[in-house]
Amino acid sequence: MNLHKLRKEFPILHRKINGRPLVYFDNASTTQKPRSVINAMSAYYSRYNANIHRGIHTLSQEATTAFEQVRDEVKTFLNARAREEIVFTSGATESLNLVAAGLEKLMKRGSEIILTEAEHHSNIVPWQILAQKTKTRIKYIPLTSQGRPDFGTYRRLLSKKTAAVSVSHASNVTGVIAPIKKIVRAARKTGTLVVVDAAQSAAHLKIDVQNLDCDFLAFSGHKIYGPTGIGVLYGKKHLLARLAPFKYGGHMIAKVTKEKTSYATPPEKFEGGTMPIAEVIGLGAALEFLERIGFAQITRHEQALTRYALKKLLAIPGLKLLGPTSTDSRLPIFSFTLSGIPAHDIASILDSFGVQVRSGHHCAQILHTKFHLEASTRISLGIYNTKSEIDSAIKSLRKTHELFRN
Ligand SMILES: Cc1ncc(COP(=O)(O)O)c(C=O)c1O
């Protein structure tokens, strides 16, 4: 992979921040966009903008073809069995809300839901709302000191009462990759549905939903070098058919009379109203970008960055990492505390050096509470990051440490 050439595809990477070259280390929040994504969206608006599905005219047909082609591309990206298993949503959050809300009628008295203590709020709150509505209970898989879900406890929590287990494929705080196949295998014995939040993993790992055998999987376009406002829910065909619709309106219907409405089949059943057409087209360009590089190269480059970053970070006096200090089964996401310096102060000083990192609870308050923290600082890397950018961040962190020591 020619990193220099790849970086040239991202116009923003040439920016300066506070007079310094931009070091973008907030990829877990959102990634930067390659020119191909920006151009694809601009081409839609400037050449074939029209609403989809309902038009006979040329522009509508061109837009519909481009839109539906992306569904095929997502099917290939995830190795789903059928294009009908791909639902477009506004993002991972909406995908998870859709599943949780859609399961309401399928919950029984005494049903239970299992989550882990590492979940993003988007994979907690929708389940809490479902639990309140259906009087079901949520149980949490505890994390080990290294931030990994305790598999033994998971097995003990699982029972015939467990309706669903919903876990992040990778944590947005610790970068820990969960053993989804093992989680699914255990869940099969109790007839439990498995929902995977792939918001963080989708840009870094090759996802094969048939191999994982999960029932639902969610991700967002903007975290995989695509636009905001678009996401995907994958669901096994027979399960999507059983879920209640999430939004009601145009396009999601089969027949409307004065008295009642029957619904279209999935995926249309879940795609009421005008869809984010430009964003779907942008997502298609992002998938093409990822596939052009290939996950073998992405993994190789990001693992090298992970090894390098870990070594350098752990050598900083007073720095404590949340989660694993090893390179096994993890993404290039590093959250840490530094000698009691407030996380926002660290992020602000790093910003003065052009280094963009996130500080706060990263929408994972349960995880932070577990580690007796309110906040941490997070460095999260992407495909275009370099070792010399890590050096810049490390230098800035060391300066931050010195500033506060004096
Ligand atoms: C693990 C995880 N799940 C879900 C989400 C929600 O994604 P979005 O805000 O794109 O819907 C995020 C976003 O940071 C995340 O990191």
Image: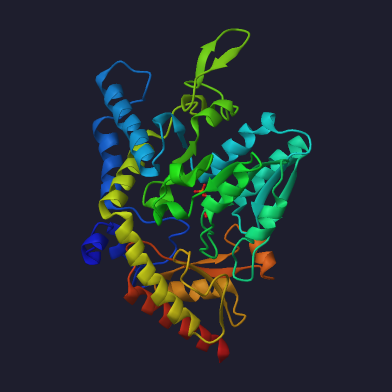
On the question of residue 27 being in view, the answer is: yes
Q: Nearer the viewer, residue 293 or 274?
A: 293
Q: 385 left or right of 350?
A: left
Residue furthest bottom in the image = 406
**Who's the residue at 59% across and 83% down the image?**
339
Q: 161 left or right of 350?
A: right
**Who's the residue at 48% across and 57% down the image?**
29
Q: Quadrant of residue 300?
A: bottom left
Q: Position of residue 386 (x, y in %)?
A: 32, 71
Task: State the count of labels.
Answer: 0
Q: Nearer the viewer, residue 365 or 237?
A: 237
Q: In the displayed structure, would residue 329 be above or below residue 106?
A: below
Q: In the displayed structure, would residue 246 be above or below residue 384?
A: above
**Who's the residue at 57% across and 60% down the image?**
362
Q: In the displayed structure, would residue 72 be above or below residue 123?
A: above
Residue furthest front in the image = 189
Look at the image and tell me in which quarter the N terminus lies. Answer: bottom left
Q: Position of residue 39 (x, y in %)?
A: 26, 44
Q: Nearer the viewer, residue 342 or 3?
A: 3
Q: 126 left or right of 336?
A: right
On the question of residue 229 being in view, the answer is: no
Q: Quadrant of residue 257?
A: top right
Q: Position of residue 169 (x, y in %)?
A: 52, 53
Q: Position of residue 321 (x, y in %)?
A: 55, 75
